[in-house]
Image (cartoon, rainbow, N blue to C red):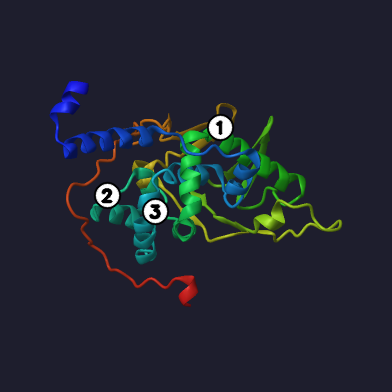
Amino acid sequence: MRKVLQSLSLFGKLSILLALLSVVLAQAQPVTLRSDQLDRLVARIALYPDPLLAQLLTASTYPDEIGPAAEWADQHSYLHGDELARAISEDQLPWDPSILGLLPFPSVLDMMRSDMAWTYQLGDAVLSQRPEVMDAIQRMRKKAKDFGYLQSNRYVKVVPSGAYIEILPVDPAYLYVPVYDPLVVFARPVGPVVVTTAITFGPPIFVGPFFLHFGWAPPALVWTSHSIVIDGRPWVRGWVGREAYVHPYRTPWVRPVGPRVEHHELRPVIHPHHR
């Protein structure tokens, strides 16, 4: 190696050193978060139903794709069900299937896009501290349940299973995104009265067989083993080797080659702060 470096120009030596440095930095683990930091990190999503949460956790590890996906979802929010799934395929969207699987949930993508620092931090934690992230979610669920906020209703079933709490949709084909203030639902109620409207739910979102290509088989969280299951197979993407990981979907999603093609009406996006 020394002889090779001696024979190179200064520019060549610097290029090799920079390439080696980039490899080292790519493999370097992100800063490890403490339990209390993880609790705060997952608070805003801890009460999401397990299938949606599984998709969100995997999607967070592709943060650079969140912004464009959120924009596309907003522009095509008038499409639903099989029409939306067909548009995703026809428009040659180049994103990971975990991102495509969130396109029926524009509010979730908007939340992730509006705080990209949070999204990057969550994705890094999922890749490098997945067991600890899942434990933090359980801690927050236990708090909300113990304080009386997290209960079964006509939208979700809250299922205690040993040391873990599952949140499952009442009807697996319809998911509802919960809306809540973490400062309320994870804090002890003031006085004997629990505010039963502290957790509300958005409109029903139908995720049928058209979305099987995008991981809705359905996705699941196996709390006992700290596993994320996508399309019936464990999702094992980690920090090291994250660039090369390809999840083994039953029907592999082939990323389109070439530019994105728009086949559908684009509707103007009105963001909340512009209303």
Q: Is residue 19 left or right of residue 29?
A: left
Q: Nearer the viewer, residue 29 or 149?
A: 29
Classify 10 Å Cα crowding around label 3: few (below 14), some (14-19), many (20 and above): many
Q: Is residue 220 left or right of residue 189?
A: left
Classify 10 Å Cα crowding around label 2: few (below 14), some (14-19), many (20 and above): some
Q: Is residue 215 left or right of residue 173?
A: left
| Up-down relation of residue 81 to residue 20 (above or below) | below
Q: Earlier in the sequence, mark 2 or mark 3?
A: 3
Name the spot of residue 55 as percent of width and height, x first: 46, 44
Looking at numbered disc 1 in the image, what kind of residue is underneath it?
Pro
Q: Which residue corresponds to the image point at 42% horizontal and 55% vertical from the top-left?
A: 104
| Up-down relation of residue 21 to residue 63 (above or below) | above
Q: Earlier in the sequence, mark 2 or mark 1?
A: 2
Q: Which residue corresponds to the image point at 46% horizontal and 36% vertical from the top-left?
A: 127
Q: Is residue 29 visible?
A: yes
Name the spot of residue 2 as percent of width and height, x first: 22, 22
| Up-down relation of residue 124 to residue 74 (above or below) | above
Q: Which mark is residue 66?
A: 3
Give me the C-alpha separation between circle 2 and circle 3.
Answer: 12 Å
Disc 1 designates what residue?
Answer: 131
Q: Is residue 19 left or right of residue 228?
A: left
Looking at numbered disc 2 in the image, what kind of residue is underneath it?
Pro
Asked whether the residues under the numbered discs 2 and 3 touch, taking CB atoms below 8 Å apart as contact, a structural biologist would say no
Asked whether the residues under the numbered discs 1 and 3 touch, taking CB atoms below 8 Å apart as contact, a structural biologist would say no
Q: Which residue corresponds to the image point at 72% horizontal and 45% vertical from the top-left?
A: 143
Q: Which mark is residue 94?
A: 2
